[in-house]
Every structure is written in structure tokens, then in C-alpha cells.
Image (cartoon, rainbow, N blue to C red):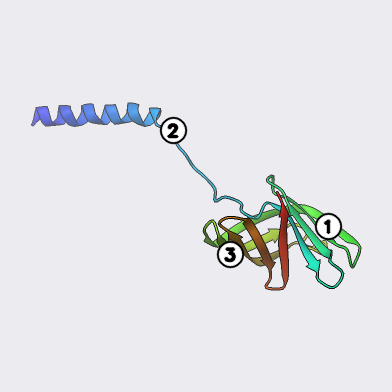
Amino acid sequence: MALCVLVLCASCDMMGKLSGLIPKISTDPPNLLVGTWKVIDTNTNTYSKQLVLDTTGKYSYTDTTASTTVEGSYSVSYDHLDLLQASGEITFSKGFDGHESAKTFSFVADKDDGPQSLKINNEDAFVFISR
């Protein structure tokens, strides 16, 4: 019985030493939405809206038809996430009109060509331009 307790205590002490050597890794989900996105007007072949999402959580939204630009911060939460499709909610600190708003999104990518489209609130279909 005494031998059993000694072995148990020795292994507890060993685990304490080992756990200090093993790094703790915590990761947030990847932000697949980073980049420049535009809504292209097919009649004029120009863009009517532009959304730029950077890696630091800042965004810039430009509506060229209304001649407005809104800048602020954003956060993303996912309902579904894989490398080729994602959906969830994106919250903009100043929305697209200067007021905070949360919007649903869906994201689609191609395995060879990368990001393809970003749909916000099932309305605007942004096309990926660049990272």
C-alpha cells in the first residue's frame, strides 16, 4: 500500500513538471473574410460598393452611388466554418450607415482560386478582389 502511494505521488510530481514544459496553444478560428471585396455593377462594369476587412479587425465600407465611406472595427462569429464555405454573423462597429449593426454573411471559396464571394444579409454579393 505504501509503495502504491509513493508511485502515485511520484507520477503526480512528474506530471506537474511535464505540464510546465508543454506549451499551451489556444487559437481563434481563422478570419477567412480578410481582404478587399467589391459589388460589381454589370451594366457599367464598375463597382458600386467596396468593403475592405483587414487582419487587425478594422474595416472600411464605401458606397460609390451614395458617395459615402464608413470606417470602424468588426468582429466575426461563425455558425459554420470550413476552408471553402463559412457562414455566421459579422458585427460592424459603425455598420454601413454610421450605426453599429450585426449582419449575417455567407462566404464561398474555390479550392484552386481561393475566395470567391461574400454575401451580406443575403443581399449584396461582394466579389473577392485581393488580400
User: In the image, which disc is placed on residue 70?
Assistant: 1
Which residue appears at 69% of the width and 45% of the height?
Answer: 56
Q: What is the CA distance from the residue labelled 2 to the residue labelled 3?
A: 31 Å
* Mark drawn on residue 57: none
Report how far apart the C-alphas of labels 1 and 2 lie in the structure: 41 Å
The outermost residue toward the front is: 112
Between residues 33 and 11, which one lies in front from this camera angle? 33
Residue 31 vs 86, above or below: the answer is above
Q: Quadrant of the N terminus?
A: top left
- The residue furthest right is 67
Please tell me which residue is depicted at 58% across the width and 55% down the height of the picture.
112
Relative placement, left or right, of 73 versus 112 is: right
Task: Please identify the quarter of the rendering in which residue 124 is found.
Answer: bottom right
Q: Secondary structure at mark 2?
A: loop
Q: Which residue is mark 3?
A: 87
Res. 48 image quadrant: bottom right
Q: Earlier in the sequence, mark 1 or mark 3?
A: 1
- SS assignment at label 3: strand
**Residue annotated with mark 2:** 23
**What x and y, as percent, mark residue 73?**
73, 52
Q: Residue at image x 36%, y 31%?
A: 19
Q: Amino acid at mark 2?
A: Pro
